[in-house]
Image: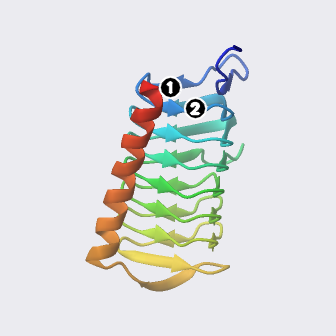
Amino acid sequence: MSAKPGPIILPYRGMLPKIDPRAFIAPGAVVIGDVEIAAEASVWFGCVLRGDVNVIRVGPRSNLQDGTIVHVASEGQGTFIGANCTIGHCALLHACTLEDDSFVGMRASAFDGAKVSSGAMLGSGAMLTRGKIVPPGQIWAGSPAKHLRDITPNDQKEFTVRAAQYVALAQEYLAA
């Protein structure tokens, strides 16, 4: 039997990622440089977090689903992901901010200086252009992204449920 595969964790310019032991980093995920991943966060299969020319921070209980790419800008800001964030499969995040309890749909993109506010959603396939802000309580969609509608209580419940499901799933993987 061969050794269990793991993630690729690499230093850059002497900076090794800091990953809480209660976080789950899937086999095949790549984490490089000045990256910090908090407790109960999860980085799933095929994700790349490249903190080589600036910082990446991932808050507690946030999940970055399969194929997500996170990078930074050498001029300007790093990428900041708050607590309890759900980031759908194949999202692209570049030098942006996701505040606590925000949601980014599958194949959505957020670029330099953009922000998804706490309790807001960037819809699947949306492109949040440079410097745009999704205000709290709104869903933005389209390319370029614009206000689609306000978040309902059912939407907010779904955000909370989804984040908790990924924490539980990650703990199951860690225990295996």
Say whether residue 61 is visible: no
Is 146 left, or right, of 130 in this rendering? Answer: left
Viewer-proximal residue, 62 or 114?
Answer: 62
Q: Nearer the viewer, mark 1 or mark 2?
A: 1
Does residue 51 sit above or below 79 in this rendering? above
Would you place residue 8 above or below residue 45 in this image? above
Residue 35, numbered circle: 2
Left or right of 58 on screen, residue 168: left
Q: Tell me the tag on residue 19.
A: 1
User: Label 1 vs label 2: CA separation?
Assistant: 8 Å
Q: Position of residue 44 (x, y in %)?
A: 58, 42
Marks 1 and 2 in Cβ contact (< 8 Å): yes
Q: Is residue 72 above or below residue 115?
A: above
Mark 1, Cα crowd under 10 Å, few <14 / some 14-19 / many 20+, is: some
Front residue of this view, candidates 175 and 121: 175
**Amino acid type, residue under disc 1 in the picture:** Ile
State left or right for residue 154 relative to residue 87. Answer: left
Q: Quadrant of the N terminus?
A: top right
Q: Secondary structure at mark 1?
A: strand
* Three-letter code, disc 2: Val
Residue 167 x, y percent position in the rendering = 38, 42
* Camera sees residue 164: yes
Tell me which label, 1 or 2, sits earlier in the chain. Answer: 1
Q: Residues within 10 Å of mark 2 (few under 14, many from 20)?
A: many
- Say which quarter of the image contains residue 119: bottom left
Q: Residue at x 42, y 42 (%)?
A: 169
Residue 74 sits in which quadrant? top right
Q: Residue at x 56, y 50 (%)?
A: 65
Q: Nearer the viewer, residue 80 or 41?
A: 41
